[in-house]
Image (cartoon, rainbow, N blue to C red):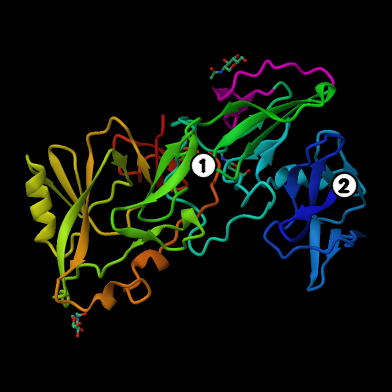
């Protein structure tokens, strides 16, 4: 427990001792400034204080007065009052990892870390919650207070409020002899995995189960106006045609057009607009208008003639018009959907400077930013009634619809 390197500084938390690979399972105040490497913990009446240069912070703050603390073999750090009752435990405040015997309550969440080396979350300027989940627990009708549980044998399962097993995510039954360790973590890439470790073999953590083998599946991995393509099983972010990365050094930063977007007010006379095609991709399904059209060219023409239209999806029957930015894009081989993107081409007599990067009008990319911390699956189906039922919608993320991903 306690002090480990994080980014350029140190963080305090719990890591598994005695294994070669440093494995952090819980981080205190993970988004606070780093603590000094000589920081000390102070047992006070209401928990464990962690004084930092700037402030007095808490490693663990109990609801009632704390008399003693204990680090349990399970990895749970517990504060007790004088009556031996638990007044705080790290298992109740999960960060990105669940350990055997730990449970995640409905409404709690696991948030992925920024990277393997930095256990803070990605700062999110707007909503912390992506409105679409890529993984759903598919326990519709289970009611409130469902919990996610990890058993000693690697069994990951859901219990309803009365304690009945309503779904097995993994089968369990893995060896539980001494030296075998398991943990479940939502990783920095947004996929949650069950890992095992064999102390006797001095092994590394190996993946027993993962929510997806396709690393493009977590939504929001690539920023706005960009889509994810797997290259040798690794995700790569690509820009829409004639779009450029917002931040060249950061492929997940999203992309913006290197032209002035079409606009209904003051249509820019220096550009002509054409539609670029992008085949075999899927995107978030939000359109302001859907038309039944039999031909792609009609869809192209319809978007070009509509100053509100910045992109369209054509599936052979329906032409769905959209505004930018596009989100959650990924290559989907086998789909017949064509994404059509309206791009501006400067007229020949136009001052070329207006299309130089830097002088281009900033797109809305700056305003909307996708949150790159992924939230784990536990937002159970509470109530279906407020949900706009599309075929994809099976779960509810608090009161928002969440998308089913098989
Ligand atoms: C769920 O848990 C909360 C808090 O413990 C409780 O108030 C509520 O009644 C529970 N709901 C059901 C349906 O049991
Ligand atoms: C989950 O697996 C256990 C056996 O490990 C079984 O008893 C239980 O019925 C399963 N639950 C569901 C919902 O299938
Ligand atoms: C179009 O180009 C001309 C000449 O370069 C420039 O003066 C004018 O401001 C441009 N119009 C718009 C709307 O940018």
Q: Position of residue 316 (x, y in %)?
A: 14, 37
Apparent side of residue 132 relative to residue 25 in the rendered image (left or right): left
In the rendered structure, which disc, 1 or 2, sits on the residue that comes first in sequence?
2
Is residue 63 in view? no
At horizontal 18% and vertical 77% (from top left) the residue drawn is: 350
Vertical side of 18 occupied by 7: above or below = below
Image quadrant where residue 292 sits: top left
Please report the residue visible at 45 percent of the width from the left and 37 percent of the height from the top.
231
Which quarter of the rendered picture does the C terminus lie within? top left
Picture quadrant of ligand 2: top right
Q: Determine which of the numbered discs, if any, sits on residue 319 in the image.
A: none
Residue 259 in percent (x, y) is at: 27, 67
Q: CA distance from mark 1 to mark 2?
A: 30 Å
Residue 280 in the figure: left or right of residue 137: left
Q: In the image, 367: left or right of 18? A: left
Residue, disc 2: 80
**Residue 72 horizontal/vertical position (percent):** 86, 37
Q: Which structural element holds mark 2?
A: strand
Q: Is mark 1 within 8 Å of ligand 1?
A: no
Q: Where in the figure is residue 150, as x and y percent of width and height?
A: 67, 29
Main secondary structure found in the magenta portion = loop
Q: Of 277 and 87, which appears nearest the observer?
A: 277
Q: Nearer the viewer, mark 1 or mark 2?
A: 1
Q: Which residues are magenta?
A: 154-178
Q: Is residue 190 above or below residue 260?
A: above
Q: Is 54 a magenta residue?
A: no
Q: Visible in this render: residue 326? A: yes
**Alpha-carbon neighbours of circle 2 within 10 Å: few (<14), some, or many (≥20)?**
many
**Which residue is found at the position 55% from the left and 43% from the top?**
189
Which residue in the structure is indicated by mark 1?
379
Q: Secondary structure at mark 1?
A: loop
Q: Where 115 falls versus 74 (above or below)? A: below
């Amino acid at each position: 427990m306690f002090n480990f390197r994080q980014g350029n500084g140190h963080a305090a938390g719990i890591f598994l001792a005695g294994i070669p690979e440093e494995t952090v399972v819980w981080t205190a105040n993970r988004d606070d400034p780093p603590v000094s490497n000589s920081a000390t913990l102070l047992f006070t009446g209401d928990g464990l204080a962690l004084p930092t240069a700037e402030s007095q912070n808490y490693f663990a703050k109990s609801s009632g007065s704390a008399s003693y603390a204990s680090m349990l073999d399970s990895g749970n750090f517990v504060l007790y009052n004088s009556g031996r009752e638990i007044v705080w435990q790290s298992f109740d405040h999960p960060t990105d990892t669940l350990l055997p015997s730990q449970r995640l309550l409905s409404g709690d969440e696991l948030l992925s870390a920024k990277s393997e080396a930095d256990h803070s979350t990605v700062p999110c300027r707007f909503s912390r919650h992506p409105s679409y989940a890529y993984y759903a627990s598919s326990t519709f009708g289970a009611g409130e207070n469902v919990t996610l549980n990890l058993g000693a044998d690697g069994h990951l399962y859901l219990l309803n409020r009365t304690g009945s097993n309503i779904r097995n995510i993994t089968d369990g039954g893995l060896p539980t002899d001494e030296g075998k360790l398991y943990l479940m973590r939502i990783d920095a890439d947004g996929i949650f995995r069950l890992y095992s470790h064999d102390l006797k073999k001095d092994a590394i953590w190996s993946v027993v189960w993962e929510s997806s083998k396709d690393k493009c599946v977590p939504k929001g991995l690539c920023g706005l106006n960009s889509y994810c393509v797997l290259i040798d099983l690794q995700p790569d972010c690509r820009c829409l045609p004639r779009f450029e990365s917002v931040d060249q050094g950061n492929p997940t930063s999203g992309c913006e057009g290197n032209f002035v977007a079409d606009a209904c007010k003051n249509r820019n006379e220096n550009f002509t607009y054409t539609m670029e095609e992008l085949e075999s991709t899927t995107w978030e399904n939000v359109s302001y208008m859907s038309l039944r059209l039999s031909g792609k060219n009609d869809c192209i023409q319809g978007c070009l003639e509509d100053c509100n239209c910045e992109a369209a999806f054509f599936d052979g029957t329906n032409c769905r018009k959209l505004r930018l930015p596009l989100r959650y894009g990924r290559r989907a081989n086998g789909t017949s959907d064509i994404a059509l993107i309206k791009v501006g081409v400067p007229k020949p007599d136009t001052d070329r400077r207006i299309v130089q990067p830097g002088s281009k009008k900033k797109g809305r990319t700056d305003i909307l930013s996708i949150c790159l911390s992924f939230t784990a699956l536990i937002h159970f189906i509470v109530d279906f009634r407020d949900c706009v039922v599309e075929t994809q919608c099976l779960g509810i993320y608090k009161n928002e619809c969440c998308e089913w991903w098989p």
